[in-house]
């Protein structure tokens, strides 16, 4: 049996934060939450809402269904410019 939707979404959010280099604080600001509230969602103590999914999808520039499809799909849908390594390389190249 695979992961449940809640666990998959937690892993997806963690993967996107890692891929973009964003801390929980930045995600909290986007969602209008505190860092503690995001931490509780990431730990499973509180559930993510559909509003959260829509807001996160817009923030990361991916479809909501990509977020719900798991970390691999969501990270693949992430634009190249949003990825941490690419941004660092572009800064060094002066772009």
Image (cartoon, rainbow, N blue to C red):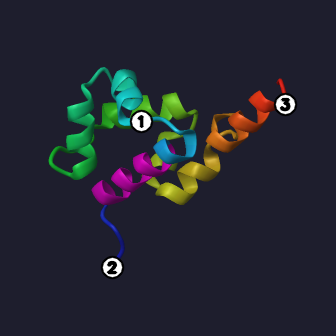
Query: Is residue 73 in the magenta section?
Result: no
User: Which residue position is annotated with label 3?
Assistant: 93
- Nearer the observer, disc 1 or disc 2? 1
Q: In this orientation, which residue lies closer to the viewer: 69 or 10?
A: 10
Q: CA distance from mark 1 to mark 3?
A: 25 Å
At mark 2, the secondary structure is loop
Q: Position of residue 6 (x, y in %)?
A: 28, 55
Q: Which residues are magenta?
A: 5-16
At mark 3, the secondary structure is loop
- Where on the picture, by quarter, is residue 56? top left
Q: Which sits earlier in the primary sequence, circle 1 or circle 2?
A: 2
User: Which residue position is annotated with label 2?
Assistant: 1
- Looking at the image, which residue is at 53% across and 39% down? 21
Dividing the image into 4 quarters, which one contains the C terminus?
Answer: top right
Residue 51 located left or right of residue 14 = left
Instruction: Using the image, determine if residue 10 lies above or below residue 25.
Output: below
User: Which residue position is annotated with label 1?
Assistant: 23
At mark 1, the secondary structure is loop
């Amino acid at each position: 049996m695979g992961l449940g939707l809640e666990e998959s979404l937690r892993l997806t959010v963690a993967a996107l934060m890692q891929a973009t280099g964003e801390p929980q604080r930045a995600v909290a600001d986007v969602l209008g939450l505190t860092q503690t509230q995001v931490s509780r969602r990431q730990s499973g103590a509180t559930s993510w809402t559909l509003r959260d999914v829509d807001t996160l999808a817009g923030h990361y520039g991916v479809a909501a269904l990509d977020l719900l499809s798991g970390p691999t799909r969501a990270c693949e849908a992430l634009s190249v410019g949003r990825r941490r390594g690419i941004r660092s390389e572009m800064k060094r190249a002066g772009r």
